[in-house]
């Protein structure tokens, strides 16, 4: 009996030693290991203010994760400047998927580059989480399970804007403008659909080339149409120029409103008087009204980034949190294959609330609010002189 006890004790000791060896080997295997994640956005060019701020926020979240010591490897970001251009975006996507250490990626701000690059990620079977591009068709059954999105779609963004300007404000004489690109076309369809649902036919509409700067012909059409409200479903380049050129042409007695692509600091460069009263919908929540949002603002500002926080900057930070959450679910050795389901099944609570994904990979966390330019600054509409009635929009 004593011999059996000694044998059992010896077995237990050997087993404990074996467990310690395996654990040490596992720690040594992960120590010094690198896992890579791709990021794509317009870091230079006309949309650089939004793309660079998003890049900053994404990197901030990754730096915080590495500093936390919670991950048994170092997470590195391959940052790609897509320049808001489809062929550049595709080339950047190919660069990312060719790296054997990449397990996931996040992009884009523009819908055109996103649509062009999606096939690259699908073919490589590397999951892509979209942080900013809003064209509704980007998330679909055909793009499952590789493509997910944490930002709302163009249709989801246009709904609260339409509710305000059509239902509450009651504007009916509309001129609708957008660009011909994927982003502009999607918004054109979305807002036109909101008008049609209310039995309203716009008195004029125009789709202009992407990057257009001379909008005098459109301005003249708006001026002669008698429109009381102008909707712009484009990005800041076209949106700010349209607002300025309308002002220069004396077309000031109209409501000027539009979509989140215009809600950047670059819009303010046209001057306080020309920019005054622009009403734009933004995705997400008002950051400084919640503790998590205030912390994000403080952390971002502490880094000394030159680019201010834009409409989609929080979504890029949130996208990083979602990918980090998925990495945690994959254990010590995440792969692109395990990350796919980890992302789809994730539940991440961050600065925008709690994000989960539906059956086509689209976020179920949809929030939006209105902003207006008042005295040369973007402020939440609900806090503005326009909301209180101290100031009024044109067209009334």
Image (tube, grey):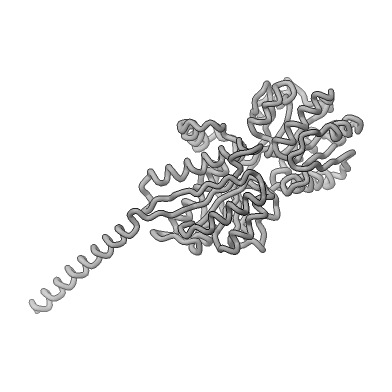
Judge whether residue 313 can be spotted in this image.
no
Q: Residue at x 56, y 32 (%)?
A: 308
Note whether 302 is above or below 71 in the view shown: above
Left or right: residue 127 compared with residue 65: right
Q: Residue at x 53, y 61 (%)?
A: 340
Q: Quadrant of the N terminus?
A: bottom left
Q: Nearer the viewer, residue 394 or 115?
A: 115
Q: Position of residue 395 (x, y in %)?
A: 84, 28
Q: Position of residue 280 (x, y in %)?
A: 70, 35
Left or right: residue 203 compared with residue 64: right
Note whether 102 is above or below 381 in the view shown: below
Q: Nearer the viewer, residue 354 or 214?
A: 214
Q: Quadrant of the C terminus?
A: top right
Q: Looking at the image, how many numbered discs can be counted on the residues? A: 0
Note whether 112 is above or below 219 in the view shown: below
Indicate the quadrant where residue 371 lies. top right
Q: Nearer the viewer, residue 364 or 140?
A: 140
Judge whether residue 104 can be spotted in this image.
yes
Q: Position of residue 347 (x, y in %)?
A: 52, 53
Left or right: residue 379 compared with residue 6: right
Q: Position of residue 66 (x, y in %)?
A: 40, 46
């Amino acid at each position: 009996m004593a011999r059996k006890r000694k044998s059992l004790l010896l077995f237990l000791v050997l087993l404990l030693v074996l467990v310690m060896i395996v654990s040490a080997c596992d720690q040594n295997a992960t120590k010094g290991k690198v896992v890579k994640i791709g990021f794509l956005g317009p870091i230079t060019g006309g949309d650089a203010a939004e793309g660079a701020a998003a890049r900053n926020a994404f990197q901030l979240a990754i730096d915080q994760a590495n500093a936390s010591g919670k991950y048994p490897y170092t997470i590195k970001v391959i940052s790609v400047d897509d320049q808001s251009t489809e062929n550049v975006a595709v080339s950047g996507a190919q660069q990312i998927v060719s790296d054997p250490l990449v397990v996931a990626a996040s992009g884009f701000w523009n819908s055109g580059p996103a649509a062009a690059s999606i096939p690259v990620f699908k073919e490589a079977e590397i999951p892509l989480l979209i942080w900013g591009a809003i064209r509704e068709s980007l998330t679909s059954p055909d793009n499952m399970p590789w493509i997910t999105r944490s930002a709302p779609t163009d249709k989801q963004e246009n709904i609260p804007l339409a509710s305000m300007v059509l239902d509450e404000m009651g504007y009916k004489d509309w001129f609708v403008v957008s660009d011909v690109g994927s982003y502009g076309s999607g918004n054109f369809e979305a807002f036109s659909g909101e008008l049609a649902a209310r039995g309203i036919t716009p008195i004029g509409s125009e789709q202009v080339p992407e990057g257009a700067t001379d909008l005098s012909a459109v301005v003249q059409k708006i001026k002669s149409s008698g429109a009381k409200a102008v909707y712009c479903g484009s990005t800041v380049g076209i949106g700010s120029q349209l607002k300025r050129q309308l002002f220069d042409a004396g077309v000031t007695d109209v409501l000027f409103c539009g979509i989140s692509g215009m809600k950047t600091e670059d819009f303010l460069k046209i001057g306080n008087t020309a920019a005054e009263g622009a009403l734009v919908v933004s995705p997400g929540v008002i950051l400084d009204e919640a503790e998590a949002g205030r912390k994000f603002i403080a952390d971002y500002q502490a880094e000394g980034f030159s680019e201010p926080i834009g409409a989609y900057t929080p979504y890029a930070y949130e996208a990083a949190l979602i990918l980090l959450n998925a990495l945690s679910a994959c254990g010590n050795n995440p792969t692109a294959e395990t990350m796919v389901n980890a992302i789809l099944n994730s539940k991440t609570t961050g600065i925008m609330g709690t994000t989960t994904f539906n059956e086509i990979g689209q976020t179920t966390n949809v929030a939006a609010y209105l902003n207006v330019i008042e005295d040369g600054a973007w402020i939440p509409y609900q806090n503005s002189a326009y909301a209180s009635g101290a100031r009024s929009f044109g067209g009334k």
